Image: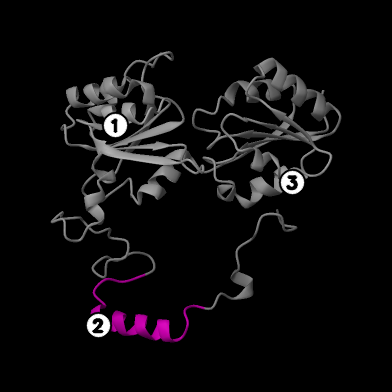
Amino acid sequence: MTVAGKVYIIGAGPGDPELLTLKAKRLIESSDVIIYADSLVPAEIAGFAKPGARIFGSKDMSLDAIMSVTLQAVADGKIVSRIQSGDPSLYGATLEQMRILEAQKVDYEIIPGVSAAFAAAAVLKAELTVPEVTQTVIMTRAEGRVAMPEGEALIDLARHRSTLVIFLSVTRMFRIAGQLQDAGYPADTPVAVAYRVGWPDELIIRGTLQDIAQKVRDAKITLQALIIVGPAVDPKLLDPDSGQQVAVSHLYSDEYTHLYRRAGRGAHADAQRAELYEAGGYEIQPEAAPHVAGTPAD
């Protein structure tokens, strides 16, 4: 039997309410029922709900309880926002919820959010894919209470020597640092730990595989922290006086041809750029304006 309501599984981002997408905020404001992960999502985000909306914090609710509220609401024709932290596709525990919605033939939609991985990179002023340094990002967690599939143990993934983003694992910092060095990362490999990124008490700890575990222990961080490992988070990459040789992306290089620009234009291109600046930039024609969520075409 098809039911009348609808469920939106919404990524709330890492904590800063201003990192919500426009679509996420619009849907929260129009929903009849809000179920939000109140241990990880600020109450301010649920506070965007309209007057009269029913709001549930899910930190002490079981899956059965969450889905009972959800299914009853959609059976009554209500719109439900199920608000998760970060992006629902990364450690969101959403698959089991979606399977129940599918079984009950409930209409639902997933709204992506800003992952803590990207919010942390922004705070660090880091590009996780630096040309000629690393072009690969591996997102994972350390083995512990949750078993890892074959071939996905941290020491196996570490052999790629790419940028590693490690979720839900800060309590195993000493073990992680040892495993990564055993896998071939040098002891002086840069590491950043981002605690509650996007929250008022956000804390960034920088170090190397040699000293980061003790720094984390000294800071008494045991939860809500993300670990990023690799030369891409080395602050010296930003320092023009560090002596670090950093490769330049082809994207904006005058020596690189792509669909929108030819290589080798040199001084002529410089003159064009100066003219463009003096003219105030490009003018976007109304017919070329992008579609904005919430307009009739949505």
Q: Which mark is residue 215?
A: 1
Asked if the stretch drawn in magenta spans residue 267, the answer is yes
Task: Judge from the rendering whether residue 229 lies leftward or rightward of residue 47; answer left or right.
Answer: left
Q: Amino acid at mark 3?
A: Glu
Q: Amino acid at mark 1?
A: Lys
Depth check: give the residue in front, 133 or 182. Answer: 182
**Measured from the top left, where is residue 240 in percent x and y?**
20, 61
Q: Is residue 33 visible?
A: yes
Looking at the rendered image, the disc whose residue lies closer to the viewer, 2 or 1, is 1
Q: Amino acid at mark 2?
A: Ala
Depth check: give the residue in front, 70 or 202. Answer: 202
The residue at 81%/24% (across/down) is 72
The CA distance from mark 2 to mark 1 is: 50 Å
**Measured from the top left, where is residue 175 in percent x and y?**
27, 19
Name above or below for residue 180 compared with residue 34.
Answer: above
Q: Which residues are magenta?
A: 261-282
Depth check: give the residue in front, 257 or 213. Answer: 213
Q: Badge 1: how crowded within 10 Å, few (<14), some, or many (20+)?
A: some
The residue under label 3 is 29
Q: Disc 2, disc 1: CB below 8 Å?
A: no
Looking at the rendered image, the disc whose residue lies closer to the viewer, 3 or 1, is 1
* Label 3 residue SS: helix
Looking at the rendered image, the disc whose residue lies closer to the viewer, 3 or 2, is 3
Marked residue nearer the N-terminal end (3 or 1):
3
The N terminus lies in quadrant: top right
The CA distance from mark 3 to mark 2 is: 52 Å
Marked residue nearer the N-terminal end (3 or 2):
3
Marked residue nearer the N-terminal end (2 or 1):
1
The residue under label 2 is 267
